[in-house]
Amino acid sequence: MKWTRDARPRRIVVISTGGTIASRWTGSGYAADASGDDVVATAAVPDHVDVEVLDLFNVNSSRMTTDRQLRLLAAVHETLADPGVDGIVVTHGTDTLEESAFFLDLHHSDPRPVVFTGAQRPFGTGDGDGPGNLYDALQVAATVHGLGVLVVFDGLVHAARGTVKTRTLDSDPFADPSGRRVGRLGFGQVDVEREPERPAPLPLPEAAIAAITSTAGAADARRVLPRVDIVMHHSDNDPVLFEAAVAAGARGIVLVGTGAGNATPEIADAVARAVRDGVHVVLSTRVASGPVAEVYTGGGAVDLAAAGAVLAGTLRPGQARMALLAGLLAESTSPERRNQLLRTLLEGPVRAESVLAVAH
Ligand SMILES: NC(=O)C[C@H](N)C(=O)O
């Protein structure tokens, strides 16, 4: 379906958070530095679009934190409280863009779009890709609705869910390795090829947002924000790092298995102990695409699931961690209900069961 727009002026708010699109040379490397106004000034603005800028923070996105992601979620929510706003563009570093975009998508209940974009080449360079990406993101934010949180990069439109950074430096760094993109841009139109599948949005995590904005500050936030770790399996791995995460106070751990989500009997025992102690474990994979699936025993996903791990579907580890974090931040009464919620948040369009049905 092709989306176009009439001449009614659209009000789009650009929320600036840093990344390469705002990065300048510091003398020893690039670092986020330029303001949101400066970033917007580099780009052409589509016809009939009025842009307002909100400078939220300015970091390279490898320095993203739960605290900052909650601030971003709250800023989006407050911005959309104004019915005169037509859409939002978030400029963000590409390293963890997939995490913030998905975290926001899990909580996004408004038909107005939130569009993430950034750059692979730095601010103010002649060959920079930031200005073009920002133009496209403004175009999409002013044109579509009802598609949730989107990622616009290099002329392509992706759903937040499932889309990850698949190339470190290319100008086309994002893709869903297990699915299809949402669409593409061209000649003032947005061509939407599929509608993203999204679970029912979660309510805003009010207690966590109150904690990070409270005067009690960091101490309060540490008490409320759950620690969620990622531990990767490999040949010769033992449970030491997994157990270190439990000892550090993790309330959730993403276990990144090999293959379709496999590890060892010793890791499966460690998972069972952690789950018994109230830690939520999600099983993802270090393979680039495809779902985790209960195929193998002897420490494989069959045993990890029996030990209490919840399978991450086709979500890669960073996004599986976001679903786990969102599940832990949501009000819930019992571990069983939370696991049920996690299954809903993790489950994507490609379901392991259907793959297994073919495999048997
Ligand atoms: N291209 C980028 O934006 C990478 C950058 N290091 C970041 O994520 O902030």
Image (tube, rainbow, N blue to C red):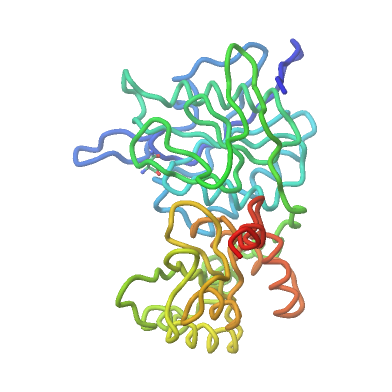
Q: Residue at image x 64%, y 64%?
A: 208
Q: Residue at image x 47%, y 62%?
A: 285
* Residue 3 to residue 162: above or below: above
* Residue 34 to residue 309: above or below: above
Q: In which quarter of the image is residue 124?
A: top left
Q: In which quarter of the image is residue 314?
A: bottom right
Frontmost residue, 238 versus 128: 238
Question: How many marks on residues?
Answer: 0
Q: Residue at image x 40%, y 82%?
A: 244
* Residue 301 to residue 103: above or below: below
Residue furthest to the left = 28
Task: State the quadrant of the C terminus.
Answer: bottom right
Residue 79 is situated, as x and y percent measured from the top left of the image, at: 69, 39
Residue 78 is situated, as x and y percent measured from the top left of the image, at: 71, 44
Residue 159 is situated, as x and y percent measured from the top left of the image, at: 61, 40
Residue furthest to the right = 83
Q: Residue at image x 51%, y 34%?
A: 117
> Ligand 1 appears in which quadrant?
top left
Frontmost residue, 266 versus 172: 266
* Residue 220 to residue 140: above or below: below
Residue 333 is situated, as x and y percent measured from the top left of the image, at: 77, 78
Frontmost residue, 358 versus 109: 358
Q: In which quarter of the image is residue 60?
A: top left
Q: In the image, 263: left or right of 46?
A: left
Q: In the image, 34: left or right of 337?
A: left
Q: In the image, 81: left or right of 303?
A: right
Task: State the quadrant of the N terminus.
Answer: top right
